[in-house]
Amino acid sequence: MTSSAWLTVRDLEGWYGESQALHGMNFEVRRGEVVTLLGRNGAGKTTTLRAIMGLLRKKTGEIRFADENLAGRLPEYIARRGIAYCPEERGIFASLSVEENLMLPLVVAEGGMALPDILELFPNLGERRASQGTKLSGGEQQMLAIARILRTGARLLLLDEPTEGLAPVIVQQIGSVVRQLKERGFTVLLVEQNFRFASKLADRHYVVENGKVIDTLDANDVAANAERIQKYLKV
């Protein structure tokens, strides 16, 4: 681990009841990076995000963010420190309009994106801002789930499978959004199984298996190790 890391996860173990899901996760994310956790279903990727966000209560190890250990902190404290979580299930409020969903999260820090800037980043949402959550397509719901956390002032975004089940054209749009967020100074920890998508975005990839990191690849290493990566992800 390097001293320049903004987020450091060290020796992280975690449990759901008596079942152990994490077996010593170790990785780091530097400020301004896009970093992915790659792996098959059940590898421990989502559990790692939940642990960082304080949603996995039974855990040991260290989760250090901006020189503070957050391992024992509650989710609301972690959110105020500038970390936001976009879960795979999206959590859109069906009875609220797009704009009401966007305005729902509390602003926890300065520097959050203003609503006009968010709608410029997500033009589909601007066109549907009066529509109810139930009227949105799956891709629009995913855009809304990401857009909603940008107002909060969080600078580290935890995105869980943002391309799952989406059409290729929507996947491309999500990729464009992630690139623009990086350009705006956001840091992104991305859980993905779609390696083709992730490989075009990330500075570094951590391969997760059985609740721990088993390999690390920088962006420059991807082309020479494509076969190895596909072997890791093969079902």
Image (cartoon, rainbow, N blue to C red):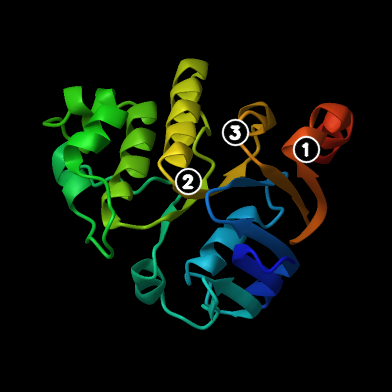
Residue 131 rendering spot, x and y as whole percentages: 15, 30
Image quarter for residue 75? bottom left
- Image quadrant holding the N terminus, namely bottom right
CA separation, marks 2 and 3? 19 Å
Which residue does the numbered mark 2 point to in the structure image?
88
Q: CA distance from mark 1 to mark 3?
A: 18 Å
Q: Secondary structure at mark 2?
A: loop
**Depicted 47 relative to depicted 24: above or below:** above
Q: Earlier in the sequence, mark 1 or mark 2?
A: 2
Task: Identify which amino acid the numbered label 3 is placed on.
Answer: Leu
Whether residue 2 is visible, yes or no, is yes
| Residue closer to the observer: 219 or 94 | 219
- Residue at 52% x, 32% y is 163
Q: Is residue 24 above or below residue 110?
A: below
User: Residue at point 26% right, 50% down?
Assistant: 151
Answer with the quarter of the image where residue 29 lies: bottom right
Within-10-Å neighbours for mark 1: few <14, some 14–19, many 20+: some
Percent x, y of residue 79? 37, 67
Query: Disc 3 on helix, strand or loop?
Result: loop
The residue that label 1 is drawn on is: 233
- Residue 12: image x %, image y %? 69, 73
Q: Which residue is mark 3?
A: 201
Image side of residue 191 versus residue 40, left or right:
left
Query: Mark 2 vs mark 3: which is more N-terminal?
Result: 2
Instruction: Rate crowding at label 2 as few (under 14), some (14 to 19) or many (20 or more) other CA atoms within 10 Å.
Output: some
- Distance between mark 1 and mark 2 Cα atoms: 19 Å
> Horizontally, is 188 left or right of 8 in the view?
left
Residue at 39 percent across and 28 percent down: it is 139
